[in-house]
Image (tube, grey):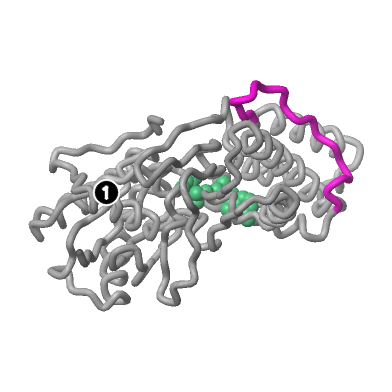
């Protein structure tokens, strides 16, 4: 079987289209939306409008870069959810229209599962390694923070879930408190590189084994910064690097400790991370260090496959294509992950 699949991603604020030949990536075009920068978060109304403007040019460019004609496509894979409804509707509608017009199968993909399967994207140089099943995946994005056991390309078991905020939100909200633009995770990563991670201590949440929680941390960071600003209005400017390094250190320690505990408990030592926060350089360094002493087989995605992209949607669609797991034309988006 030789399949060409177009993947479409529009769940949040990135409009993306990718073409794969089986699991080999031919193109991956991503249009990010700068409009949200000054709002401290994604504004849903602006996001769906920007998707409408971007989606056809992005798909066109993905096909051109892949050197593929529309009529060579075998199927259209698209993100059905979870995400922002107005954003998802744009990608879902375009995917349905294309599948109908080209008379080819339509494949719905869950955005979380696409992140989990991003480790199976192969590129032209054929150097990418993929994890053996079962593996544990720490899924850390702007909307989700979970540890999931991936048993095969179609079977996913959630082991740990967040009670409140996601790790990405903890980064983004901390960045906002420091006056940094959205999305703040990358900015914190950058400033933290020149800071002392142990300069300030923030309390780690006391939660059950199968839980993450980040909202208390955000609040204590907010109060700490606010109290210090009262006595020193220059506090942020004088301590930006140390503040970023310390909050980042707290967030990644919470993530790493739980991942280590679940690995020990399940006996699974094939470990992967995915989602936007998996691009964090300190987390990658910490887990790389842990992987040596713990004898983990560790999988860190390329940064471009950490944040939202259609390549992971296309590859997740490919495994459903092999099973002939297709969707009907009356499919509608959903906003929450159902594990
Ligand atoms: O997976 P993603 O692109 O979108 C969602 O599905 O939510 O994740 C976006 C999140 C944002 O919260 C962003 O701040 C965070 O990933 N992020 C990072 C880094 N790059 C992106 N967080 C920490 N360090 C980074 N280098
Ligand atoms: Zn995502």
Asked if the stretch drawn in magenta spans residue 21, the answer is: no
Residue projecting furthest to the right? 231
Instruction: State left or right for residue 147 relative to residue 321.
Output: right
**Quadrant that contains the C terminus:** top left
Task: Where is residue 320? Give x, y as percent.
Answer: 27, 49
Q: Of helix, strand and loop, which mostly describes the magenta segment?
A: loop
Asked if the stretch drawn in magenta spans residue 210, the answer is: yes
The picture quadrant where one finds residue 325 is top left
> Which residue bears the numbered disc 1?
320
Instruction: State left or right for residue 73 relative to residue 239.
Output: left
Q: Residue at x 34, y 40 (%)?
A: 81
Task: Where is residue 33? Give x, y as percent.
Answer: 45, 57
How packed mark 1 is, by other alpha carbons closer than 10 Å (few <14, some 14-19, many 20 or more), is some
Q: Residue at x 14, y 41 (%)?
A: 328
Q: Measured along the vertical axis of the image, is residue 159 above or below residue 137?
A: above
Task: Where is residue 288? Give x, y as percent.
Answer: 69, 56
Residue closer to the observer: 259 or 226: 259
- Can residue 74 be seen in the rendering of this structure? yes
The picture quadrant where one finds residue 220 is top right
**Quadrant that contains the N terminus:** bottom left
Q: Measured along the vertical axis of the image, is residue 141 above or below residue 54?
A: above
Highlighted magenta segment, given as a residue range: 196-213
Residue closer to the observer: 59 or 205: 205
Task: Where is residue 177? Give x, y as percent.
Answer: 70, 41
- Can residue 184 be seen in the rendering of this structure? no
Q: Residue at x 75, y 57 (%)?
A: 191
Residue closer to the observer: 31 or 22: 22
């Amino acid at each position: 079987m030789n399949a060409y699949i177009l993947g479409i991603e529009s769940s949040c604020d990135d409009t993306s289209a990718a073409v794969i030949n089986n699991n080999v990536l031919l193109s991956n075009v991503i249009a990010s939306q700068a409009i949200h920068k000054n709002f401290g978060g994604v504004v849903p109304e602006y996001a769906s409008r920007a998707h409408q403007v971007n989606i056809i040019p992005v798909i066109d460019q993905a096909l051109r870069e892949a050197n593929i004609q529309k009529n060579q496509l075998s199927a259209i894979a698209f993100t059905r959810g979870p995400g922002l409804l107005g954003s998802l509707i744009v990608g879902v509608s375009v995917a349905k229209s294309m599948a109908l017009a080209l008379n080819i199968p339509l494949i719905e993909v869950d955005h979380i599962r696409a992140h989990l399967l991003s480790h199976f994207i192969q590129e032209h140089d054929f150097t990418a390694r993929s994890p053996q099943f079962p593996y544990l995946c720490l899924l850390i994005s702007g909307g989700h923070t979970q540890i999931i056991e991936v048993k095969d390309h179609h079977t996913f078991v959630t082991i740990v879930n967040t009670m409140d905020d996601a790790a990405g939100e903890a980064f983004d909200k901390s960045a906002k408190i420091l006056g940094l633009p959205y999305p703040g995770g990358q900015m914190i990563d950058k400033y933290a590189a020149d800071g002392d991670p142990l300069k300030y201590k923030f309390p780690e949440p006391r939660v059950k084994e199968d839980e993450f929680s980040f909202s208390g941390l955000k609040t204590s960071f907010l109060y700490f910064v606010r109290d210090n600003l009262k006595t020193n209005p220059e506090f942020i400017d004088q301590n930006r690097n140390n503040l970023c390094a310390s909050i980042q250190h707290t967030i990644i320690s919470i993530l790493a400790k739980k991942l280590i505990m679940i690995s020990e408990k399940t006996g699974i030592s094939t470990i992967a991370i995915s989602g936007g926060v998996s691009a964090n350089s300190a987390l990658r360094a910490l887990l790389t260090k842990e992987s040596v002493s713990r004898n983990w087989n560790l999988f860190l995605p390329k940064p471009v496959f950490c944040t939202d992209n259609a390549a992971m949607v296309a590859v997740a669609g490919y495994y459903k294509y092999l099973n002939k797991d297709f969707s009907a034309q009356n499919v509608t988006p959903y906003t929450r992950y159902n594990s």
